[in-house]
Amino acid sequence: MTFDLYTILYIIAIIAEAMTAALLAGKLEMDLVGVFLLGWVTALGGGSIRDVLLNHYPLSWVRHPSYSLITGFAALATIVVARHMHKLRKLFLFLDAIGLVVFTVIGCQIAIVGHLSLICVVISGMITGCMGGVLRDILCNDVPLLFRSELYGTVSVSTAIVFLLCSHYIDNKNIELIIAMIFGITFRLLSIRYNWTLPRFTYRS
């Protein structure tokens, strides 16, 4: 495994997503298997769905088995430090934003390498960034965050578009990644800070 900037940020992202999922598992009083699997699904599920849809094999966690160990360890380690997590809330919001943005960019990059259309690149980024969280919420019997008014999918799509623009005008992968990350993380954190939302559709017969 070569540890370029993408790989380092990806590992940070899967650790953060696994730990946030483990906290939710704790709130629902899951056992150790539940904590492990929920963390694994949240961290690696979006990329797995993307790879299946795009016929991109082997899946990332099959190509790199260490990813499963990293996510599982991160989820279980959360049990030990859970009592201190309230002190790290802002840090985890930041790490979650990193996860969303990094997954989105990686999804876009894989679609670009596969010479897919621009719309497919954006969709690939959104699937990678958001579907792990969708699977987590479904398994926890909750309405997925992606489908609520909070800006989550919107941040992913916007980040994908910015990354596409950067990849067209800038010939440096690391700079493309950094610009897209700065945009996406800033957008996500500002939307949380100022409670930016999309209009809601309410229907009552």
Image: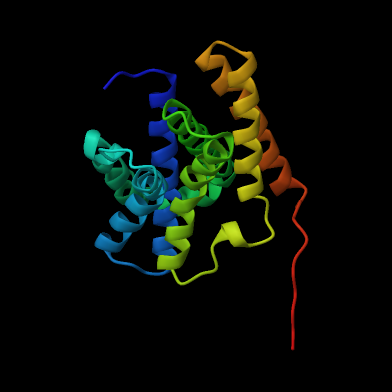
Residue 79 in the image: state x and y as whole percent: 34, 54
Q: What number of labels is visible?
A: 0
Residue depicted at x 39% and y 40%? 15
Residue 107 in the image: state x and y as whole percent: 47, 36
Front-lying residue, 124 or 156: 124
Residue 116 in the image: state x and y as whole percent: 48, 33
Front-lying residue, 92 or 132: 132
Residue depicted at x 60% and y 42%? 156
Whether 1 is drawn above or below 53: the answer is above
Q: Is residue 64 rendered to the left or right of residue 180?
A: left
Image quarter in which the N terminus is found: top left
Whether 85 is drawn above or below 104: the answer is below
Query: Can you name the residue that lies furthest to the bottom here?
Result: 205
Residue 92 in the image: state x and y as whole percent: 53, 43
Residue depicted at x 35% and y 53%? 41
Q: Is residue 109 rendered to the left or right of residue 183?
A: left
Q: Identify the image's colour scheme: rainbow, by chain, secondary structure or one colour.
A: rainbow
Residue depicted at x 28% and y 47%? 72
Q: Is residue 205 rendered to the left or right of residue 125?
A: right
Image quarter in which the C terminus is found: bottom right
Q: Is residue 79 something one can see in this rendering?
A: no
Q: Is residue 138 something one can see in this rendering?
A: yes
Front-lying residue, 166 or 149: 166
